[in-house]
Amino acid sequence: MGQLTRLHADNLHFPPADNALEDPPGLLAVGGDLRPERLLAAYRQGIFPWFDDSSPILWWSPDPRMVLNPADVHCSRSLGKLIRRGLYRVTMDSAFDQVIQQCAAHRDGQPGTWITEDMQQAYIRLYHLGYAHSIEVWQEHTLVGGLYGISLGRMFFGESMFSRQPNTSKLAFVALCRQLQQWSFTLIDCQLPTDHLASLGATPMSRQRFLALLAENRIEDGLYKHWQLDENCLVA
């Protein structure tokens, strides 16, 4: 049986991820705040925030965890054709604020967003500290797709993605994977399972295995700066 822990503003301590509840699955703690020190402490322990405006801050560590080795990303034939056509330009860390705002925007079929204004500001702070990164897809000067997440050592923790044109979020994800493969990243944490992520090659991993890999690869090694995409990553 798991146990829900209440966090206090003056204490950055998190309980072990194995304490997470089975129902709702993965819920570990409630409360605290979104200052950079707490967010980074959470990610280093395989924990992430996920909540909406109607609830307190909720912290999760699901089992299993959806993950992807960057080398295993699946690029479909249609996506390969899209890359070869050269319709879009892909960048890194050139419009973080716009990407997170687009990820937070209302989507058809969804009642609201978990990327609250407080969450946006928290991750923008991490971006300025060099821990959060974005990938942007442009059609001329218009942002039409992208994603953002957190980097620690050789681990990338994906947070959210969006598309304004068909397959542009997938294009951003493939570009990210190819660049991270060049930089010898071990794993991308995709958090929760979705058909979209599965189509890109993500698979479930036990929490125990995920935490072991995280402990081996989270060592910070100076890659904390604004990223730039190697254009050769998108040579189909």
Image: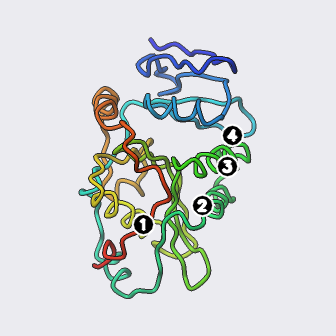
The label nearer to you, 1 versus 3, is: 3
Give me the C-alpha separation between circle 2 and circle 3: 10 Å
The label nearer to you, 1 versus 2, is: 2
Give x and y (percent) for residue 44.
44, 32
Q: How is the image coloured?
A: rainbow
Which mark is first along the chain, 2 or 1?
A: 2
Give x and y (percent) for residue 15.
50, 16
Is the Cβ of the residue at disc 4 closer than 8 Å to that at disc 3? Answer: no
For badge 2, the amino acid type reads: Phe
Give x and y (percent) for residue 137.
51, 73
Q: Which residue is mark 4?
A: 52
Which mark is first along the chain, 3 or 1?
A: 3
Q: Which residue is mark 2?
A: 96
Q: Which residue is mark 1?
A: 170
Q: Is residue 198 above or below residue 90?
A: above
Is 39 situated left or right of 120 in this image? left
For badge 3, the amino acid type reads: Gln
